[in-house]
Amino acid sequence: MTRIVILGGGPGGYEAALVAASLGATVTVIDSDGIGGACVLTDCVPSKTLIATSETMTNFAMAPALGVRPHGDPSAEVGSWELTGLPHLTPPDVVTVDPEQVNERVRALARAQSADIERRLERERVEVVHGTGRLVGPHAVETSDGETFVGGIVLVATGTSPREISGCEPDGERILTWRHLYDLKEIPEHLVVVGSGVTGAEFASAYRALGAEVTLVSSRERVLPSEDPDAARLIEDVFVRRGIEVLNRSRAAGARRIGDGVVVELTDGRTVTGSHALMAVGSVPRTKGLGLTEVGVRLGSGGHVVVDRMSRTSVPGVYAAGDCTGVLPLASVAAMQGRIAMWHALGEAVTPLRLGTVSSNIFTEPEIATVGVTQRMKDTGAIAAEVTTVPLMRNPRAKMMGIADGFVKLFCRPGSGCVLGGVIVAPRASELILSISLAVENGLTVDQIARTLSIYPSLSGSITEAARVLRPRDLFASSTDVPR
């Protein structure tokens, strides 16, 4: 019977443990943070729970445009939300956010999810050891209390930690990382978000909807610089219209407390004053002090564990999965890396990791969901593709729901029409992207999507419309969704 020792209980670790246990291995998971890891306890699950509350506030703010207004509030005029910024249309005396209750719900859901996963591991007879561990040999892991576990296979899945900038060290009270947000007793009066990547954009969007004034400090030309440029421009435009101050081409040099607030100093000499500062400048792999290099595991220049598409490291029998590998910082990818590692280690038939079919989502308002080929690949000539973009404002369901911002973009292969990728910017884009992901994964063509009947009216109707625009045929010369 093979013994598996896993360092880290996040998605990469616990999914690997479940696979290994189902294949008859004896499995030990050594975890220092709580089963579920940062994803469940401090990152993905808490942040999306908070965002669910912010979405509710956005819906309240949009109500006047749909003919619904607070009782006795004639000032909430229909359509005014488009001009004045959404949060201002939900008067504090009508709808308020209770930050302590919101954050307690966030923490409770995270704890419950962690407990559910640990119970599942226990049912599958996976041994869970709470503590830290380090490799003392290629197949031996020593815990913080001196116990040593020897396994035929070792999996490293230790995740990442928030990156800190010199001069902007967090204090957990006014200068924060995203892991401090759920301990706040109040909604920040003015949140200065440093970093305009996924994390910075999501929290800027959420806290603006919750009523905070928000300044977003971006070192690049636009927010979300690594995302689809059309989607990023749209989100930045929405941010500005909703009252977020966006400082592009601005880099933070330091952050310091002043009384009950903070001052963020920029490299060009300017300063930004707020009540709180959120440092959202990326993550660093948790690979120091694990004994990896001592046993021969190769690390990349940024400290990530170097792995192949089977999750193998440079040492036979030692695998790695999740954010500590730097492959793609998504829970779904971490989980698949962990599964692949165990299937491969235990002799099962397995397909190497394929990133070209991985879908991802940014939980701003509206959301951005992507899969497959990107605009950058097309523009640089890396991939030959045809592309079309259909604005949501011409979708009948979007009109009914008062949705003015968003689009569906499809990429297909010239000639065959095979779907290569797509981008959706819309409320709940994370739910809409699945149909495009299925098309990419299974090699479907835009003709096949165009022939598929969509519900009328529905937001998903814009996906079939985009397919008809990309590959017009006499059969699809006219759309039932949009008068031509």
Image (spheres, rainbow, N blue to C red):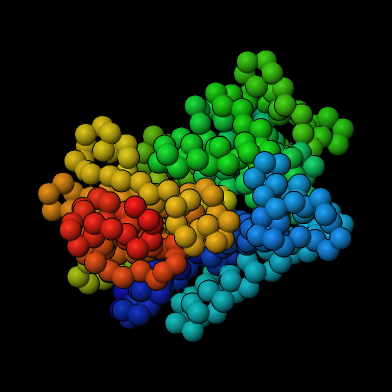
Q: Is residue 69 above or below residue 297?
A: below
At x 58% / y 41%, what residue is drawn? 238
Name the residue nearer the viewer: 327 or 154.
327
At x 50% / y 28%, what residue is drawn? 220
Residue at the farthest top position = 269
Residue 333, visible in the rendered structure: no
Residue 269: x, y in percent?
67, 15
Give the quarter of the image for residue 66: bottom right
Residue 424: x, y in percent?
42, 52
In the displayed structure image, the side of residue 483 where residue 357 appears, left or right: left
Residue 129, visible in the rendered structure: yes
Residue at the farthest left position = 415
The quarter in which the N terminus is drawn is: bottom left
Residue 108: x, y in percent?
69, 69
Residue at the farthest bottom position = 123
Q: Is residue 202 above or below residue 96?
A: above
Name the residue nearer the viewer: 360 or 87.
87
At x 77% / y 34%, what residue is drawn? 274
Name the residue nearer the viewer: 285 or 369.
369
Name the residue nearer the viewer: 174 or 158.
174
In the displayed structure image, the side of residue 212 where residue 472 appears, left or right: left
Q: Is residue 412 above or below residue 229?
A: below
At x 82% / y 35%, what residue is drawn? 261
Q: How many numbered discs?
A: 0
Residue 74: x, y in percent?
83, 54
